[in-house]
Amino acid sequence: MTGLALTTAGVAASPAAARITPSAEDRFEQLGRPAPDIHRDEGKGDEKRKGRSKQENDRSKGIPVACDTDKLIAAITLANARGGAMLDLAKGCTYLLTAAIDDAGLPAVTTPITLNGGKHTTITRAAAADQFRILTVDTGGDLTLNHLTITGGQTTNAGTDGAGVFVDAGGTLTSNHSAITRNIAGGSGGGIANNGTTHVHASNVSHNTASAAAGGVASSGVLDISKSSIHANAAMDGGGVTSSGTVRIEHSRISGNRAHSSGGGLFVMRGTGSVADSSVTTNIAGDVVGGILASLGVQMAIRSSVIAENVAEAGIVGGLGVDVDASVVVTDSIVKNNNGSGNGGGVYNIAELVLRNTKVFGNQSGDQGGGIYNEASATLALFGTKVTKNIAVTDGGGIFNEVGGTVDLNNATGTVVVKNRPNNCVNVPDCLG
């Protein structure tokens, strides 16, 4: 095999149902750290009260917008003309969009504009209306969403990206304590398509779909996700998130997403990526890599995170796939209970992979390499890592190394490969068989 078949033809390079299980949270306890909490800020007591006071003060500075869609459209139009504004939308209001303005339900944002919502403040497309996305951020635009729900966007024409929010090159989106949900894109990025800079903080991106890549978020620019949940999205490739630029994910959960082809949870197509203090769990790929896919030439770091219970239904690699010319370092993490119907239950490596102080256990493959499958010409190094209790149907329960591949266990650092079935290793020097 010369590749994972991980890069699918036709995937756009630019933009383009259950919560995390208790067992996933238990894995953070095994690491000696709490699971990420997307529902609470880190501050406590007085800090929280100060945060609420600041938020109330910020709202008091905004321009009130009554619960009337025409008035919201007029307020955004005026804000663009005047160089920006903070707009306080009505609490408990649903702003129902009935007609498109340049392919979106609201005027394109071209200046710094903040939309402050409140409890149950929603912006949605009317079900009987023609198809259009909800918001566009043009070059020079800087949109901040606070406590808002963006839903009902639909751009089902082939190749049309970003049904919830489309961010053009040179534009910026910040989502705080908001929900981007139940949007449908004919291209990539059901929830958000980002060609500029997008920050998703303490927000939920869920139940969005895309015909091409990234049901949740598709990004070719800079994408930061923190204290957020990317859940139950679906696409052809990259069910939750795809990135071909720079992606940073911290203290977040990517769970329950589905890719009909490759990369169920996170598909880093090109560029660089990092995942820290996060969980990637219960994602599904119809073909290869249920959890995280680092594709051609990607540079990626994964730290203090859990990759668990992901599935590749009809192909290889349940948990983590490292494709041609990629380089991935995994530190202080857990790869557990992933399942691939072919080779590589937990991990499949074609390029360069380093595992430091990481546990790989309870994974299963339908053929070889229950814990880790290492291809010919690939390089795998393990430092202080435990590969235990993995199962392969055919061979290499712990690690299967193709002839020509390099595996360095670094046993002096505490690396252990034991209790795997039907055996611990194949073609791995210094392994006990």
Image (spheres, rainbow, N blue to C red):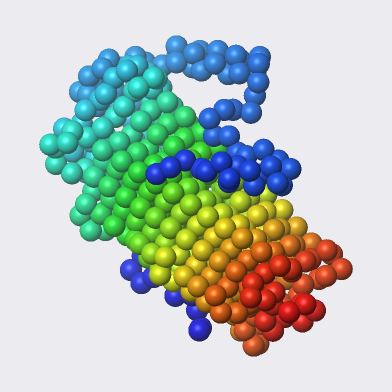
Position of residue 128 measured from the top left corner of the image (x, y, whole percent) = 12, 36
Question: Residue at the spot x=35%, y=56% of the render?
Answer: 235
> In the orientation shown, which residue stands out farthest toward the right?
412
Question: Residue at the spot x=56%, y=54% of the render?
Answer: 308
Among the 4 quarters of the image, the one containing residue 373? bottom right
Position of residue 15 measured from the top left corner of the image (x, y, whole percent) = 37, 54
Q: Is residue 143 left or right of residue 156?
A: right
92 is higher (above) or lower (below) than 151: above
Quadrant where the C terminus is found in the figure = bottom right
Number of numbered labels in the structure image: 0
Q: Is residue 203 visible in this depiction of the protein?
A: yes
Q: Nearer the viewer, residue 410 or 432?
A: 432
Position of residue 304 measured from the top left corner of the image (x, y, whole percent) = 67, 49
Q: Nearer the viewer, residue 292 or 109?
A: 292
Q: Is residue 258 left or right of residue 25?
A: left
Q: Is residue 15 visible in this depiction of the protein?
A: no
Q: Nearer the viewer, residue 94 or 263?
A: 263
163 is higher (above) or lower (below) than 419: above
Among the 4 quarters of the image, the one containing residue 6? bottom left
Question: Residue at the spot x=54%, y=75% of the render?
Answer: 393
229 is higher (above) or lower (below) than 269: above
Q: Is residue 350 left or right of residue 240?
A: right
199 is higher (above) or lower (below) than 210: above
Position of residue 230 measured from the top left corner of the image (x, y, whole percent) = 46, 44
Question: Residue at the spot x=56%, y=41% of the render?
Answer: 22
Among the 4 quarters of the image, the one containing residue 188? bottom left
